[in-house]
Image: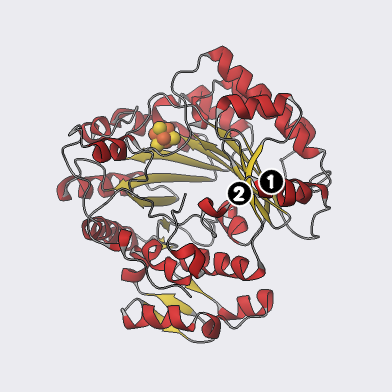
Amino acid sequence: MADRTPSVLDDQTEVGSYFVATYPPFSAWTTAAVETDGRPALERPPVPGVPLGLYLHIPFCRKRCHFCYFRVYTDKNAQEVGDYLDVLAREWELYASRPALVGRPLNFVYFGGGTPSFLSTRQLEGLVGRLSALTPWRDAEEVTFECEPGTLTEAKLSSIRGIGVTRLSLGVENFSDEILELNGRAHRSPEIGRAYAFARSLAFPQINIDLIAGMLGETDENWRVCVQKTLELQPDSVTIYQMELPFNTTISGNLLKGTGRFDQPVADWPTKRRWVREAFEALETAGYSVRSAYTAVKDPSRTRFVYTDRLWQGADMAGLGVASFGHMNGVHIQNLDTWETYAAAVRRDEIPLNRAYRPTPEERLIREFILQLKMGSIKPGYFKEKYKVDVLDHFREGLGSLASEGYIAACDENRVALTREGLLRVDGLLKRFFRPEHAGIRYT
Ligand code: SF4
């Protein structure tokens, strides 16, 4: 296994990716593999028993947040949004007719972005009508919808509930108007309370609140207030990300060019970890359980995350929309990443793939092992059954180094568990499990 790479583990928040979303890193995926692996994967029948999901990328936002690294557009008019939704619906028709997908029920659906709640009620219902006419999702285990509080009215939330959304995720990020402004967010604090009250009154089965620890301008005092206000709302789950600075954010661009535009540094990693630790402790005191490096849930017996669980276990997923990611029959795929090339490919009746990667069995093992570690613990027996591998032996060196650094709380054949300190920095600890050829390369 690879040695630990120190770059992003250092205390300062430097420009570069921290969050590990998959393995191998995105930069290892290639355009050549679209033809050799990506398209052939769509032509094969599915492996029996593998669940299928659908991800819909809605790449519109009212404003671009200064820390955003997603493919989003803030300048499209209603006509252009309508055109995009037409392309999305056509893309699903193309997918749904391939042997890998034909006739398969959807186990989960995820509306991500961007800002799915940017769509008007009419646009949303029109899109869902077209998609679900082809593949109904009434029986899906989970339908998640990401929202920006300032885009939500009672009527729109009612329509979101009406299309079968079971998990509403509110991108609150912070409760301070000054910090929201400083970081380029479009919404303000009064909109949070209003949207949350509407959502509760509509009885969504699960409401999640997203926070970010370490936004520009964050302070100890304000963070305490944010956690307190979150607790007062009593969401079903709380997700907390530590602010990072991937290369393509506005903040990163300005830092690299030395423009001086953002003169307040992003808090260092120890401070961000402390803020998350304090938030988790406050949530635990209030009865929540920490479920992963990012999430605490009010009732673990009721609150599930089908999307992440399935994806991490290797489910199939069609990712619709510009730059979307998917996975099909053992191959990772990503769509073309500009509006023009993506839309033009779909209009030629082509599934608009840009790059792909077929992981080896060992890479699949590493992927699931490191992603499960982000939950705080793994069961070696699960890996023995699924991969016929003893992970205690296979990852002996990496686990040994974690233990010697004090990040392992348990390590036996029943369970490998991280300490809370290990969990809070887990993304920075995972590279030691990468294959040597992936350890030093750019992540995205
Ligand atoms: S709302 Fe989300 S997707 Fe949109 S600009 Fe902000 S961070 Fe990016």
Q: Amino acid at mark 1?
A: Val
Callout 1: SS? helix
Label 2 neighbour load within 10 Å: few <14, some 14-19, many 20+: some
Name the image quarter holding residue 248: top left
| 42, 380: nearer the viewer | 42
Tell me, yes or no, whether the two marked residues, 2 and 1, touch with CB atoms within 8 Å.
yes
Whole-percent x, y for residue 179 in the image: 23, 36
Q: Amino acid at mark 2?
A: Thr
List the residue tagged with mark 2.
30
Which residue is rendered at x = 41% and y = 54% of the image?
Answer: 19
Whole-percent x, y for residue 371 in the image: 51, 63
Q: Could you tell whether 335 is left or right of 349 in the image?
A: left
List the residue tagged with mark 1.
34
Whole-percent x, y for residue 95 in the image: 75, 38
Figure colour scheme: secondary structure
Whole-percent x, y for residue 122 in the image: 60, 18
Q: How many angstroms separate mark 2 from mark 1 (CA)?
A: 7 Å
Q: Is residue 37 visible to the viewer in this orientation of the structure? A: yes
Which residue is rendered at x = 74% and y = 25% of the image?
Answer: 348
| 212, 343: nearer the viewer | 343
